[in-house]
Image (tube, grey):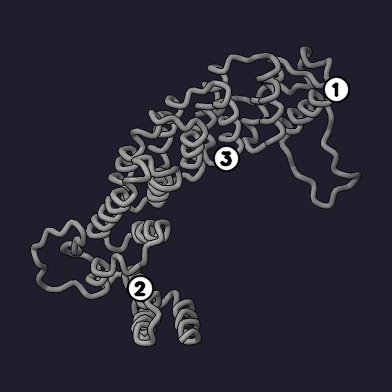
């Protein structure tokens, strides 16, 4: 496909003859001049010229859009565009339509999402925004900016109707990829950092639910670091000792037995058939359980586990485990 030719330069357009372009100042002879394209240099020169005279009009929106398409991280163009949208009372549905396109095209650019937030504070269409974010996440399930934007929408508008289906949304994302660390982080945000919405009196029930959910996930994919981190997070956030889940952790620190017991244990689900054991995260967790206990025998047990990590199961972090051993022995 032959690309479309670039639009004519603003310096050649009669309708822009009233604006004096303002070149970028780079000293007389810059040591490392930036080699802008003629199109970009022309557009930004006219943007500076517009800013200098303070014009805010529909053609300024066209100019800022042109600059943004050439450089979506141009924060000055975004800021002046926002000021122009406010000044001329540009229809917000038009701006959202453009943002839908640009967010889809430049989804890893911070300025795109920041401008979108500013527009949403005016339009207040939060429900539609969650649907848009879900659509974008289908393309990139782990994009930081998209997840952060979703959390902002929930927290800023803070409506019960918005939060109501959020755990179901997280489950949907995890069913697609149980190792999606962004989805695990979002679950923690929804359940704990946004406030336990089931009521403070139900906190114990919520914590138990989350522990069971995480254990079951680990039993299906034992070497999923995201789930082990979530397990730690639930305990630490709720000021529970790591030993709370020690009976669950121990089977994952050993090789998978030849014969598995056909047990149904919701509280402590065992590893499934074909699990790759021992699990490094489980060994680390068990060592931390011993260290948390604090006795000299407990520390000795932790040291033995760290040595197994350094020498056999996690040699890439050998220096780290040796450091953990050294620090633990100093405290005995």
Instruction: Give the percent coordinates (x, y) of residue 50.
Output: 79, 23
Distance Cα–Cα, label 2 vs label 1: 70 Å
Residue situated in front as seen by the camera: 120 or 241:
241
Q: Is the residue under label 2 in contact with that under label 3 (CB below 8 Å)?
A: no
* Residue at 63%, 15% in the rendered image: 90
Q: Tag 3, which secondary structure?
A: loop
User: Are the residues at dot 2 and dot 1 in contact (C-beta closer than 8 Å)?
Assistant: no
Dot 3 or dot 2, earlier in sequence: 3
Residue nearest the viewer, comparing 303 with 194:
194
> From the image, which quarter does the C terminus lie in?
bottom left
Q: Identify the residue position indicated by label 2 in the image.
A: 289
Element on which disc 2 rests:
helix
Eye-nearest disc, 2 or 1: 2
Q: Residue at x 75, y 33 (%)?
A: 41
* The furthest residue to the right: 28
State the residue at coordinates (75%, 21%).
10
Mark 3, other Cα within 10 Å: few <14 / some 14–19 / many ≥20: some
Residue 39: mark: none
Between label 1 and label 3, give the one nearer the viewer.
Answer: 3
Q: CA distance from mark 1 to mark 3?
A: 30 Å
Q: Is residue 196 above or below residue 305?
A: above
In the rendered image, residue 283, in percent from the top left (x then y), is placed at 33, 73
């Amino acid at each position: 496909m032959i690309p479309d030719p670039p639009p004519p330069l603003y310096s050649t357009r009669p309708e822009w003859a009233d604006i004096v372009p303002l070149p970028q100042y780079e000293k007389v002879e810059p040591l490392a001049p930036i080699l802008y394209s003629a199109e970009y240099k022309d557009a930004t020169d006219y943007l500076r010229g517009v800013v200098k005279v303070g014009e805010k009009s529909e053609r300024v929106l066209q100019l800022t859009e042109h600059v943004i398409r050439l450089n979506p991280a141009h924060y000055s163009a975004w800021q002046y565009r926002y000021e122009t949208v406010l000044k001329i009372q540009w229809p917000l549905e038009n701006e959202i339509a453009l943002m839908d396109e640009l967010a889809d095209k430049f989804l890893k650019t911070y300025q795109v999402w920041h401008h979108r937030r500013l527009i949403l504070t005016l339009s207040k269409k939060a429900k539609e925004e969650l649907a848009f974010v879900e659509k974008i996440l289908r393309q990139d399930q782990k994009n930081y900016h998209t997840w952060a934007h979703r959390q902002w929408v929930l927290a800023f508008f803070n409506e019960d109707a918005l939060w109501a289906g959020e755990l179901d949304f997280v489950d949907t994302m995890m069913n697609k990829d149980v190792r999606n660390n962004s989805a695990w982080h979002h679950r923690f945000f929804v359940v704990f950092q946004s406030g336990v919405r089931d009521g403070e009196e139900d906190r114990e029930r919520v914590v138990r639910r989350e522990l069971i959910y995480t254990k079951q996930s680990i039993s299906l994919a034992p070497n999923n670091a995201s789930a082990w981190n979530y397990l730690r997070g639930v305990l630490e956030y709720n000021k529970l000792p790591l030993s709370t889940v020690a009976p669950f952790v121990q089977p994952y620190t050993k090789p998978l037995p030849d014969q598995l017991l056909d047990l149904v244990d919701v509280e402590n689900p065992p590893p499934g058939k074909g699990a790759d054991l021992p699990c490094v995260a489980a060994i680390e967790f068990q060592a931390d359980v011993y260290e948390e206990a604090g006795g000299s025998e407990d520390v000795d047990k932790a040291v033995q586990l760290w040595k197994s990590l350094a020498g056999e199961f996690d040699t890439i972090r050998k220096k780290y485990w040796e450091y953990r051993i050294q620090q633990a022995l100093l405290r005995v």
